[in-house]
Amino acid sequence: MANDARTTAVRSTTRRQPRSGERKPRAKNHEDRWADIIERAGTIFYQKGYEATSLQDIADAVGMLKGSIYYYIKTKEDLLYELVTRAQDMFEATLEEGEETAQSPAPVRLRAFIGRWMALTSREREWGLVAEREFTRLSRRRLKRVIERRDEFSSYVKDIIRQGIDEGAFDPATDESVAATAIFELMKTSHLWHRPSGPLTMAELGDWYATFAIRGLGGPRWRGRKGG
């Protein structure tokens, strides 16, 4: 099982293709304006929250009439969905491993993953926060798609934990789902208190999280319980 997990963990560097059926292709100038709308919407959602933001707020920020935004979207939810899925597209890169890392013991792979996630969190603070904070406001159909993709991240970490148990590096009594959830909660809530001017950089915080998680799972010197 450990070998299978490591083999399937090697991800292609090819980015996910555009989601079919979400938007029709447009001329380059319209695509540039669409990108600007998304960028400004992300900033305003980050600052004011999704519910408190109006389409007029976004139109004013972009410098266009509110009615013109309807060329690009039907509802404000379209903007939130685009932001959430783009954030997921970006974070999908954290699932990619080089061949050497993919063939490494589970504690090494887990530390590398946490490092990748925290590095991207540092660069994409606003979009990551909006996606995590607001995704539950999506309609049922869209929420289902988003949750399915979130499950891909969880499955990836659970596979690493399962590998560690198979290798004898992690406590076999570990609940993989609970452990994976705890790791993601640590990483995703960092924005609530971390400050760039604080004593730890995001990279150092990620390294601390990795040490905390690996030790909590029993690694790297798990010996088992007496009589177990």
Image (cartoon, rainbow, N blue to C red):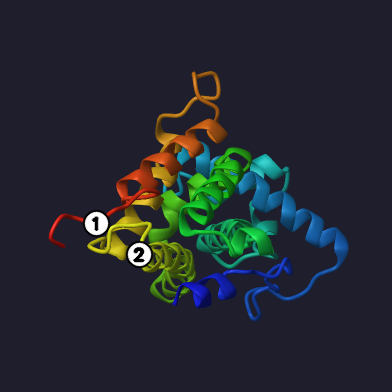
Residue found at the very far left of the displayed protein: 227
Nearest the eye: 196 or 182 = 182
Q: Considering depth in this image, is 9 or 168 the residue closer to the camera?
A: 168
As helix, strand or loop, the secondary structure at mark 2 comes to helix
- Which residue is tagged 2? 165
| Residue position for label 1 | 224
| Residue in the image at 31% along x and 46% along y | 216
Q: Residue at x 35, y 64 (%)?
A: 165
Vertical comparison of 216 with 96: above or below: above
Q: Residues within 10 Å of mark 2 (few under 14, many from 20)?
A: many
- The count of marks equals 2
The front one of 63 and 16 is 16
Q: Which mark is residue 126?
A: none
Q: Nearer the viewer, residue 118 or 19?
A: 118
- Provide residue 52's location: percent of width, then percent of height: 43, 44
Q: Position of residue 196 (x, y in %)?
A: 55, 24
Asked if residue 3 can be seen in this view, the reply is yes
Horizontal and vertical percent for residue 182? 32, 51
Say which of marks 1 and 2 sits in front: 1
Looking at the rendered structure, the secondary structure element under dot 1 is: loop
- Can you say whether 213 is above or below 157 in the image? above
Q: Residue furthest bottom?
A: 21
Q: Which amino acid does the dot numbered 1 rest on? A: Gly
Residue 57 showing in the rendered view: no
The C terminus - image quarter = bottom left
Q: Amino acid at mark 2?
A: Ile
User: Seen in the image, is 46 located left or right of residue 119?
Assistant: left
Instruction: Say which label, 1 or 2, has the lower sequence index.
Output: 2
